[in-house]
Structure formats: C-alpha cells, structure tokens
Amino acid sequence: MKNNWSKNFANKYIKKYKKLGFSKDLALRVYTTHLLGRNKELVLHGGGNTSVKTTIKDIDGKKYSVLCVKGSGWDMADIEPEGLPAVKLEPLLGLKKKKYLSDEDMVSFQKRNLINIKSPNPSVETFLHAFLPFKFVDHTHADAIVNVTNRPGALKFCNKIFGDKVGIVPYVMPGFMLAKKVYEIYSKNPKLNCLILMNHGIFTFADSAKEAYDLMIKYVSQAERAVRKLKSKKIKQIKKFSTKFNA
C-alpha cells in the first residue's frame, strides 16, 4: 500500500487552518484523516475514526485538555475541524476503572463533556481513543486487515503476520467494554503501537500524525503481503461423469 504522506501538503494544511483559527494539531489531524478516508482500501464510506489529544480554550477562558475525535455523520474523506468534536479528556480518563457503562450512559456522558454542546455526537469509540495514551490515534476497517481477521484460524494467522508491537484484541462490540479490553491489553505491553481487533479492524497510534499514519500503512501492507502469499486451493476436476442412475 502506498504511503501518501507529503510534507508539502502537511504544511499547506497547517497554513490553511491557522488562518481559520485552528491549531497545528487539528490541521494535521484533518490532513491524515483525509489521507486515510480517501483510500478506499482503508475506509469505506463512513467507516473508521481518528482522534487527537490537544488543548482548547473554553468560553470561561480556561484551557482544557481535550480529545478531538471524529463525530457522527462526518466522512473521513472530507472531514473538517468541526467534525472532530472536542471532549474534555480528564472526565473520560476518570472512568478507566469503572467496570461497566451502558451505551446510553456512555453517549450521555460524552455529550455532557463536550466543549461545544452543539457539536456532533462523538464516536462510539471515544473512550477507546481516550484510554490509549498517545496524541494521535487512527482507526480503519482496512480490507486486508478484515481479510486476515475474518477467517478460520485468524488468531494464529495474525500472530504469524505481525510482530511483538502489535496486540491482538478478541471481538468485543464497539463501546465502553471494548475500550476497557483495549486498555487492558495495552497496559500489559506498553511497547505496542498497533492493535488488531478480530472481526473489526486496526488501530495505530503515536505522538505524531505522520508516525500514526505511517504505522497504519506499514501494518496494512504486511497484511496485504500475507494474503497474497496464501496458496489458493486447487479444485479437483471430476474425470468421469456418468448420467446413468438406478431407478
């Protein structure tokens, strides 16, 4: 898979959004989200999400640590900063030890902690993005990743393909419990820079937009090469075929 990062284009995004009053963090988040969203082998329409941890000044004049995460209804291919609603980060992190949170309570809690209540609803995977202690988090449902995770013997196949910096996560419905499971797996191996979610997709993360994007291309490319190497099963031809039958 081709890596489409361009330093020139990254700088153009930074300059463009600075004029519109947005930070470098958000400009780069928009840029790499576009790179991911416009690659149809990574993201089908509406699929996947991205985030960046940064600071934003609220109406009270105070600066808050926030998670700007893809909002409901926005397409990664043409997302703008408004499509990355800012959620106060500390309240999200405060629920790391909570054992259970219903989907309804999760959505309500996320909305209560928006900097701008008029923003779109944050992604159902907001807590997962928050719990990973990296500035940039990228998530796609890449074709090649789904190809290796949605097959018999997928766990063994994934362990064969990916190295020790990749964590394999059993399938859990997106939401708070998936965020808890991901945090549990990451905590056991803080050297991880990628998570493969069985029957779901892939997360890559880093403290720079370029590195998180580079990791996405790297691991999806590994999956692509592994799939290409699979030997297709030969169909045995029937040498003799008889139309005779016993009545």
Image: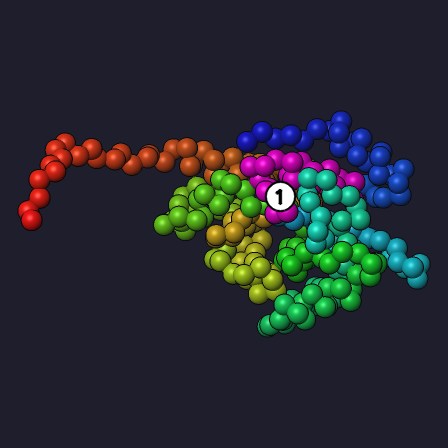
Query: Where is residue 186 shown, x and y percent of the image?
Result: 56, 56
- Dot 1 amino acid type: His
Task: Determine the residue positioned at 52% across, 61% down.
Answer: 172
Q: How is the image coloured?
A: rainbow
Left or right position of 22 against 223: right
Residue 37 in the magenta stretch? The answer is yes
* The quarter of the displayed image where residue 125 is located: bottom right
Left of 82 or right of it: where is 172? Answer: left
Residue 200 on the magenta segment: no
Which part of the image, by quadrant, shows the N terminus? top right
x, y (%) of residue 196?
51, 49
Tell me which segment is drawn in magenta.
25-47
Q: Residue at x 61, y 64 (%)?
A: 176
User: In the image as oriented, which residue stretches furthest toward the top?
Assistant: 8
Residue 52 x/y as whole percent: 73, 49
Left or right placement of residue 158 versus residue 1 in this view: left
**Is 190 or 15 nearer to us in this picture?**
15
| Of the pair 217 and 123, the residue shown nearer to us | 123
Could you tell me which residue is drawn at 85 percent across and 34 percent down?
A: 15
Residue that protrudes farthest toward the front in the picture: 247
Residue 85, image x, y percentages: 77, 54
Relative to 109, 181 lies left or right: left
Residue under label 1, please give it. 45
Q: Name the quadrant containing residue 123.
A: bottom right
**Which residue corresponds to the image point at 92% horizontal and 59% vertical from the top-left?**
59
Query: SS of the residue at dot 1?
Result: loop
How many labels, in total?
Answer: 1
Q: Is residue 184 visible?
A: no
Q: Are there few (<14), some (14-19), or many (20+) residues within 10 Å of tag 1?
A: few
Q: Nearer the viewer, residue 220 or 199?
A: 199
